[in-house]
Amino acid sequence: MIETTATFGNLELTPQLNSESIPAAKRRRPAPVFAITSGKGGVGKTNVTANLAAALALKNRRVMVIDADLGLANLDLLLGVRPSYTLADFFAGAAPLDEIIVANRQGILLLPGASGVQEMTSLSSDQKAALLTELDAITHPLDIALVDTGSGISDAVTYFTAAAQEIVVVVTPEPASMTDAYALIKVLASAHGQKRFWILANNVSGEAEARRLFDALSRTALCFLNAALDYLGWIPRDPRLARAVARSRMVVEDAGDAPSAQAFVAVAQRMMQTAAGGVAVKGNLQFFLRRMLAGERGGR
């Protein structure tokens, strides 16, 4: 086994690879940060993020989830933790970042956002710089990071999404979901220079419907945006998933034999293959918030 390490200050991401024949000089590569986003709310984006984190943890991957839906955060409910503090407390000066990060019973680390705090929806440059400074001061060994963004095309969504190495756009068969997903991809491609997107079809009847959604988006994006869309996978419409969501639980943990749980595991496997295969990335975790901060300053 070899280790490849990317750093974010002192934060190490060290995925395990089965490639002992790789020369030492070529062994270091950035570990991936996946932004999970959507054009509209209500498509199951946060549930997707939580279940993918759980599926990755089952594969013995060390996972951190950043709840970047800063004003309406609820990942803590799905992960089964009750944070003593949130990012709102950090920005209020009530708690340092290392006291905010919590782990659930699976070992998934969560950096919780705040819920119902309107001020969190628009962070200043100074607040972002303070967050970066604190992140530089903590150490957690990780293999992968997932960022649950807000939905839509607000500044906060595009900052967090464009900063990640890989962008996963969650869509459902609803026409509004498809229209808004295209609008999000358009903004990220035209205003933020993003040209590569993963599409994850959620709440579909089967792979045939998922492929139709992907093909429709892909053709339009390639024709009008010159953006490349890749198919990440699909999550079926599943009563057991709906029951888990109603109880604020993860179906991967509660009903591992359910079709949706097995689908989350398959998508997590695809993500791990992407990470191990060295798919073209846009930097590494060290520059995650630095790029977001630089983007804001450059626009002023």
Image: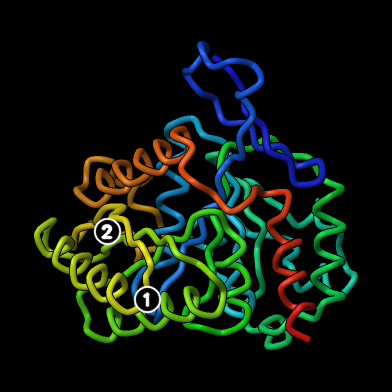
Q: Which residue is mark 1?
A: 225
Label 1: few (<14), some (14–19) or many (≥20) C-alpha neighbours in 10 Å:
some
Q: Secondary structure at mark 2?
A: helix
Residue at 25% from the left image edge and 76% from the top image edge: 220
In the picture provided, is 299 more to the left or to the right than 95? left
Q: Quadrant of the N terminus?
A: top right
Q: Is residue 102 above or below residue 184?
A: above
Residue nearer the viewer, 242 or 203:
203
- Category of crowding for the residue at label 2, using alpha-carbon neighbours closer than 10 angstroms: few (below 14), some (14–19), many (at least 20): many
Q: In the rendered view of the protein, which quadrant contains the C terminus? A: bottom right
The image position of residue 94, as x and y in percent, is 88, 68
The residue carrying mark 2 is 241
- Residue 294 in percent (x, y) is at 76, 69
| Amino acid residing under circle 2 | Leu
The Cα–Cα distance between marks 1 and 2, rounded to whole angstroms, is 34 Å
Q: Where does residue 225 sit, x and y in percent of width and height?
A: 37, 76
**Would residue 266 be found to the left or right of residue 227 on screen?**
left
Question: Would you identify the image quadrant in which residue 206 lies?
Answer: bottom left
Q: Secondary structure at mark 1?
A: loop
Who's the residue at 64% across and 16% down the image? 24
Q: Quadrant of residue 86?
A: bottom right
Left or right of residue 42, residue 188 in this image: right
The type of residue carrying mark 1 is Leu
Residue 250, x across and y down, in percent? 39, 53
